[in-house]
Amino acid sequence: LIAKGAWNGTGVAGLLLSGEVLRQRYGFSTAQIGVSIAAFGVGLAVGNLAAGYLRRYLKRDEDMLLLVLALLVLSMSTFMLLPLPLPVALCCLGAWGAALGLGAPAGTVVLASRSGPDKGMVLSFAETFNNIAILASVPLAVRLLELKGPPATLWVLGIGLGIGAWLTVLDWFASRRSDEALPLRD
């Protein structure tokens, strides 16, 4: 629950700030920011549509979450840290959207499959943790973005991403061990 809340909430929090990053770097108007953020939406849709296919290819949702986290960390970090040409920045936003589009369903499946009869309660807690991550990171990240620019903002977002990634990797190892411990079926 905490892992998904941390990485997913931080990913959404970063998206909330990305428009201001575009304004600072490229001098965009509100309309130009809106059109540019559409790259995230396209990536999100592609990620959602590709989730089932990738799940069949990777076999385990936990494996997909590792791929998602790598893509999310790479795309967010590149976007925030580097003064990119606009097409590359838009590709980063698209990859960021794709990561969340793949990750949200995979994370939900993992939580639902492990929660037994308490699925509704567990999934509502997951959404609460997403919102807590957004609420915890946005005010400080906005202030740092205003004072120091996008790289400083990544320090705040990196905390949430780091916690989410660390817990997800720990869970991946634990789930691999539990899968290996299961007796083989005929």
Image: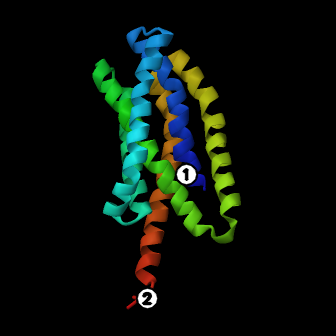
Instruction: Tell me which numbered mark, 1 or 2, is placed earlier along the sequence.
Output: 1
Provide residue 20's location: percent of width, then percent of height: 50, 18
Figure coloring? rainbow
Vertical arrangement, residue 82 with respect to residue 44, above or below: above
Q: Are marks 1 and 2 in contact (CB under 8 Å)?
A: no
Residue 66: image tag:
none
Q: Residues within 10 Å of mark 2 (few under 14, many from 20)?
A: few
Residue at which label 1 appears: 4
Q: Residues within 10 Å of mark 1 (few under 14, many from 20)?
A: many
Q: Depth check: 38 or 137 in front?
A: 38
Total marks shown come to 2
Residue 77 visible (yes or no): no
Q: Secondary structure at mark 2?
A: loop
Decide if residue 58 is on the left or right side of residue 175: left
Provide residue 54's location: percent of width, then percent of height: 34, 56
Vertical arrangement, residue 152 with respect to residue 123, above or below: above
Q: Depth check: 186 or 16 in front?
A: 186
Provide residue 172's location: percent of width, then percent of height: 44, 64
**Residue at image location 43% in from the left, 10% down from the top:** 28
Residue 125 visible (yes or no): yes
Q: Secondary structure at mark 1?
A: helix
**Residue at image location 40% in from the left, 14% down from the top:** 25
Provide residue 31's location: percent of width, then percent of height: 47, 12
Residue at far bottom of view? 186
**Type of amino acid under label 2:** Pro
Q: Depth check: 141 or 59 in front?
A: 59
**Type of amino acid under label 1:** Lys
**Residue at image location 58% in from the left, 68% down from the top:** 114
